[in-house]
């Protein structure tokens, strides 16, 4: 195995810190703007690199959570072939070709989602895995070469900061908030990352925790104070991009004297997804006055705290999903996707008026939301064609699921629970983001049923040679991808905004 991976290591990464730069070269906050060393406003606009160092089910097509498929693949084809496949996946998913394409669009920043498991093991905590640093260095370096800033986003922490699939936790309870050691380990990791990247001018900043869901609304503030102090002791200069609570939607419980009035060089993040950008039950978005008012109201509610305290805002995630002809039979694909782009344009107009930086979700996937997606005739899509259709029919993924085909199964379950639970007891946190029916679907479909499909996914790899595994991973190379041209053109049209 060492011989197989040895060749990869020569391609993995530049040193994180830049010896030729000084701390004054690093971007900083001035008022409500991000500026360079000369005080010129830098409007960071780009996308999130999801699905790479933090794999997600809807992005690459597996069921459940990343740790489940990694464990299953190792058990199914052995540790040597499994490690080879995942290493090749990491190598091919984002390369120089991706960075050059991205630069050609004029976008200037990429938010890199990372999973803590790349940097430490649960059974060997607080021992840094250098391989994870090397993979991250590689993409930071590739982007820097093209003049693209990066923001490091810790998307997954021990125990899970929320109960969703993208926190790669074992269940729906965000145990991160219940165990101090989990919180301590995340701070330890940030100390390592801050030490490694301090002084690097192409790191725009650190996003310490993606979409936290703290049911107490107090432990997040306490943890932010701790991670702020720990990072600042090592790296006083890089910007911190902090997400609001409850999936980056809620800042209302934060006490200004204990938070923003003490924190310097900090930007406050929201995730501004609109329900109009997803399947049922919403009709096609047509940009009526009423619809636009709802889109604006949703945004304004999320940023009200920042406006009240005169704070800089970053929209760290947003964006609709798109219909696909191979999955969405009976759907007017063109009309649906036109309506989603129309929604996106209306959102971008708001961000232009506000002159805020943004990072749309996401760069690359198998065709649901990405700026680019792998082609239908790639080895990956051929191998998993029937499995992906099954996943879609069963609404296995929570993200953008259309549950119409399985409503006849789950509606009776919802009705049964509703009959036995008084309405005043139904709104369990993280309501209202997780509504009553959605919570039932998440636990019964997206966790329980998905768990039974993990081994079926892994069995697709049985008997594959190293060459075939390489071909599967190579499906994610840029040259094997298709651009979502209307989406990209829309982003390019809004990549700049007039100075304040």
Image (spheres, helix red, strand yellow):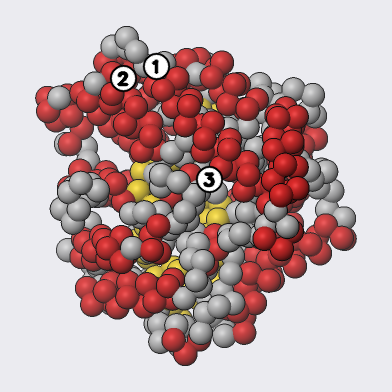
Contact, mark 2 vs mark 3 (Cβ under 8 Å): no
Looking at the image, which residue sits at the far left? 3
Position of residue 317 in the picture relative to residue 349 (left or right): left
Q: Residue at x 63, y 41 (%)?
A: 441
- If you read the primary sequence from the N terminus, does the residue marked by circle 3 or circle 1 appear first? 3
Contact, mark 2 vs mark 1 (Cβ under 8 Å): yes
> Spatial distance from mark 2 to mark 3, Cα to Cα?
30 Å
- If you read the primary sequence from the N terminus, does the residue marked by circle 2 or circle 3 appear first? 2
Q: Which residue is mark 2?
A: 76
Residue 146's x, y, as percent? 37, 49
Q: Residue at x 36, y 54 (%)?
A: 159
> Spatial distance from mark 3 to mark 1, Cα to Cα?
28 Å
Q: Which residue is mark 1?
A: 459
Position of residue 254 in the picture relative to residue 423 (left or right): left
Visible in this render: residue 143?
Answer: no
> Spatial distance from mark 2 to mark 1, Cα to Cα?
7 Å
Disc number lying in front (3 or 1) = 1
Secondary structure category for the residue under label 2: helix
Position of residue 331 in the picture relative to residue 197 (left or right): right
Contact, mark 3 vs mark 1 (Cβ under 8 Å): no
Q: Residue at x 32, y 46 (%)?
A: 139
Secondary structure category for the residue under label 1: helix
Work out which quarter of the rendered image holds the N terminus and state it.
top left
Residue 364's x, y, as percent? 49, 38
Q: Tell me if mark 3 has few (under 14), some (14-19) or many (20+) residues whose alpha carbon lies within 10 angstroms of its own.
A: many
Q: Residue at x 43, y 38 (%)?
A: 65
- If you read the primary sequence from the N terminus, does the residue marked by circle 2 or circle 1 appear first? 2
Position of residue 287 in the picture relative to residue 5 (left or right): right
Q: Tell me if mark 1 has few (under 14), some (14-19) or many (20+) residues whose alpha carbon lies within 10 angstroms of its own.
A: few
Label drawn at residue 362: 3
Label drawn at residue 150: none
């Amino acid at each position: 195995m060492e011989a197989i991976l040895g060749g990869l290591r020569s391609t993995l990464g530049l040193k994180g810190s830049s010896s030729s730069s000084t701390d004054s070269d690093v971007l900083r906050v001035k008022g409500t703007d991000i500026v360079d060393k000369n005080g010129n406003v830098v409007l960071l606009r780009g996308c999130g690199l999801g699905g790479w160092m933090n794999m997600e089910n809807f992005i690459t097509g597996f069921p459940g959570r990343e740790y489940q498929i990694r464990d299953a693949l190792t058990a199914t084809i052995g540790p040597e072939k499994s490690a080879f496949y995942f290493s090749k996946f990491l190598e091919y998913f984002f390369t120089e070709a991706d960075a050059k394409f991205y630069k050609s669009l004029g976008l200037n920043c990429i938010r890199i989602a990372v999973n803590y498991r790349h940097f430490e093991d649960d059974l060997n905590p607080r021992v840094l895995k250098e391989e994870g640093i090397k993979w991250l260095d590689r993409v930071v370096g590739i982007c820097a070469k093209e003049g693209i800033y990066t923001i490091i986003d810790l998307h997954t922490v021990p125990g899970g900061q929320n109960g969703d699939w993208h926190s790669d936790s074992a269940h729906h309870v965000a145990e991160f908030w219940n165990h101090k050691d989990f919180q301590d380990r995340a701070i330890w990791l940030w100390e390592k990352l801050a030490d490694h990247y301090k002084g690097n001018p192409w790191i725009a900043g650190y996003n310490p925790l993606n979409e936290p869901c703290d049911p107490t609304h107090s432990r997040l503030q306490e943890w932010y104070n701790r991670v702020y102090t720990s990072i600042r002791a090592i790296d006083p200069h890089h910007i911190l991009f902090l997400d609001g609570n409850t999936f980056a939607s809620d800042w209302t419980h934060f006490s200004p004297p204990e938070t923003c009035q003490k924190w310097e060089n900090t930007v406050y993040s929201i995730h501004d997804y609109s329900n109009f950008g997803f399947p049922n039950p919403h009709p096609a978005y047509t940009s009526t006055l009423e619809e636009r008012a709802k889109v604006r109201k949703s945004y304004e509610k999320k940023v009200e705290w920042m406006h009240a305290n005169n704070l800089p805002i970053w929209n760290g995630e947003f964006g609709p999903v798109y219909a696909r002809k191979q999955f969405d039979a009976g759907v007017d694909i063109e009309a649906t996707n036109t309506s989603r782009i129309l929604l996106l344009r209306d959102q971008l107009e708001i961000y232009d008026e506000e002159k805020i930086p943004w990072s749309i979700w996401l760069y690359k996937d198998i065709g649901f939301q990405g700026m680019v997606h792998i082609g239908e005739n790639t080895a990956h899509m051929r191998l998993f064609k029937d499995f992906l259709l099954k996943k879609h029919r069963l609404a296995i993924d929570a993200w953008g699921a259309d549950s119409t085909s399985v409503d006849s199964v789950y509606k009776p379950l919802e009705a049964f629970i509703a009959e036995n639970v008084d309405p005043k007891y139904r709104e369990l946190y993280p309501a209202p983001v997780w509504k009553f029916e959605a919570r039932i679907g998440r636990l019964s479909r997206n966790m329980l049923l998905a768990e039974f499909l993990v081994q079926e996914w892994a069995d697709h790899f049985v008997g594959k040679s190293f060459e075939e595994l390489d071909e599967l991973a190579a499906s994610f190379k840029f040259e094997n991808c298709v651009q979502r041209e209307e989406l990209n053109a829309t982003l390019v049209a809004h990549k700049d905004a007039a100075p304040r």
